[in-house]
Amino acid sequence: MKPIGIILAGGQATRMGGGDKCLLPLHGQPLLAHILTRLHPQVSSVALNANGDPARFADTGLPVLPDSIAGHPGPLAGVLAGLDHAAEQGANHIVTAAGDTPFFPEDLVSRLLQAAHMENTPLAMATTPAEDRPFHRHPTFGLWPVSLREDLRQALTDGTRKIIAWTEPHGCAKATFPETPDPFFNINTPEDLSKAQARGQN
């Protein structure tokens, strides 16, 4: 069974001036439409982690999953919401994708699964080469097993907020994506959106 795809869009987008980054226009469509085009073929189904009124996403037909931990604790809360949803659906894994990253690889899921299998770990995370360090992590693009959801819930309750702080003790494979331009370019500012517009469709 393919993993369930979870789009993480629960952040507050402060550097963009607030609002939903995934609804910003790119090449005539919302960012969310570009993300769905890439993610849908790779997973069994897709849900959206977002807070606030879910009606603003009604035209997508996606289940909207709010954080179950109050106070905007970050993307790990979105992962937990996705894992709880997957458990209800009888799935074993989810794969997460950030709601502001429209160019991620079309074989993301298969390469995350392969990395976890090869390194015999329950978790996997996307990485890219970096000039000043061995690699650059992209922790919002990961493979997460439903079996760890209660462990994650407890960690969040205890105050854990950084993804790496939770994943590393469990064992997290690194799926390397050396493609250029950077497939994990994410849109945080109006300037980033302009760069994405200039980049084209891939």
Image (tube, rainbow, N blue to C red):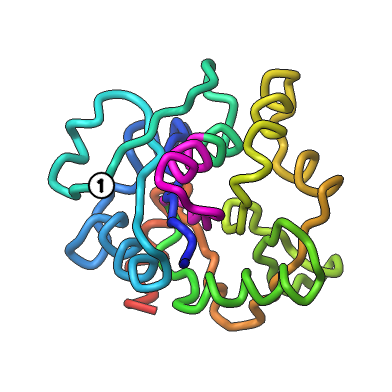
How many numbered markers are drawn? Answer: 1
In the image, residue 62 lies at what x, y percent? 25, 47
Q: Nearer the viewer, residue 113 or 188?
A: 113
Question: In the structure shown, which secondary structural element does the residue marked by tag 1 occupy?
Answer: loop
For residue 130, side relative to residue 147 (left or right): right
In the image, residue 86 lies at what x, y percent? 46, 45
Residue 202 in which image quadrant: bottom left
Assess disc 1: are there few (<14), some (14-19) or many (≥20) residues with their C-alpha within 10 Å of its C-alpha.
some
Compared with 56, 130 (above or below) is below
Report if residue 95 lies within the magenta region. yes
The amino acid type, in three-letter code, at marker 1 is Leu
Compared with 172, 75 (above or below) is above
* Residue underneath mark 1: 62
Magenta-highlighted residues: 81-99
For residue 180, side relative to residue 88 (left or right): right
Judged from this view, the residue extending furthest toward the bottom is 179
Report if residue 114 lies within the magenta region. no
Q: Residue at x 73, y 21 (%)?
A: 159
In the image, residue 166 lies at what x, y percent? 77, 40
